[in-house]
Amino acid sequence: MTDPSVRRRVATLQRKTKETEIRLQLDLDGSGQFQVATGIPFLDHMLESFARHALFDLVVEAKGDLEVDDHHTVEDVGISLGQAFREALGSAEGILRFGHFVLPMADSKIEVALDLSNRPHFNYDVELANHRIGEFDALLAEDFFYAFSQNAGIDLHIKKTYGRNPHHVVEAVFKGVARALRVAVTMDPRETGLPTVKGAL
């Protein structure tokens, strides 16, 4: 039975610009269920993997100016996911706050370290052998996580140790970030307040 005093960490967001229209729902205390439709098949696949490995329930419906290119949609989904994450996290009382994960995928290995500090910073050390994954521009993964980290208030560091196949590298990035977030948002039963000496995140 769910304790009624425990706040469910959820957020619903709608964002509309001249370039995109996005509806997003996020539950940080989910089980990895997802329903994703962005019009960009590879981005859908990455967001589905992200939800599954973070154990977040995620709904994303996005319509963008894909006739121009994928950039606006990818970036705006990152913005929306970051805003929803920050809203769902709330005061952040009781969380572990820090997350770190090293994720291997076939020929690739990615290291992710992050801090839910509400002081965004982004470092992306991921060089790709080429930039195409089917019809998807793999360079947009950096734009996605920059937008996500800035709007979520996350100090996010992503580093490729090695890897040649761009599909494996980018998928390892999404899964690695998801797994690190899964750790960072976990409630610590010994933490009775905010995990900081400053009194606020």
Image (cartoon, helix red, strand yellow):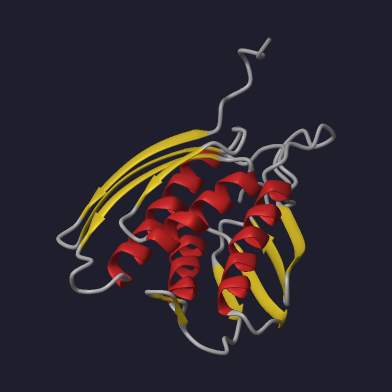
Please tell me which residue is depicted at 44% across the width and 45% down the height of the picture: 84
The reply to whether residue 119 is in sight is yes
Above/below status of 54 relative to 150 = above
Above/below status of 59 relative to 38 = above
Please tell me which residue is depicted at 57% across the width and 90% down the height of the picture: 129
Residue 20 location in percent, x, y?
22, 58
Residue 150 location in percent, x, y?
47, 64
Q: Is residue 170 left or right of residue 87?
A: right
| Residue 173, quarter of the rendered image | bottom right
Residue 57 location in percent, x, y?
53, 37
Above/below status of 74 relative to 22 = below
Q: Residue furthest left?
A: 18
14 and 195: which is toward the camera: 14
Please tell me which residue is depicted at 65% across the width and 66% down the height of the picture: 172
Q: Is residue 198 left or right of residue 19?
A: right
Above/below status of 152 relative to 143 = above
| Residue 176, quarter of the rendered image | bottom right
Figure label count: 0
Residue 28 location in percent, x, y?
58, 38
Q: Residue furthest top?
A: 1
Please tell me which residue is depicted at 73% across the width and 71% down the height of the picture: 106
107 and 85: which is toward the camera: 107
The reply to whether residue 152 is in sight is no
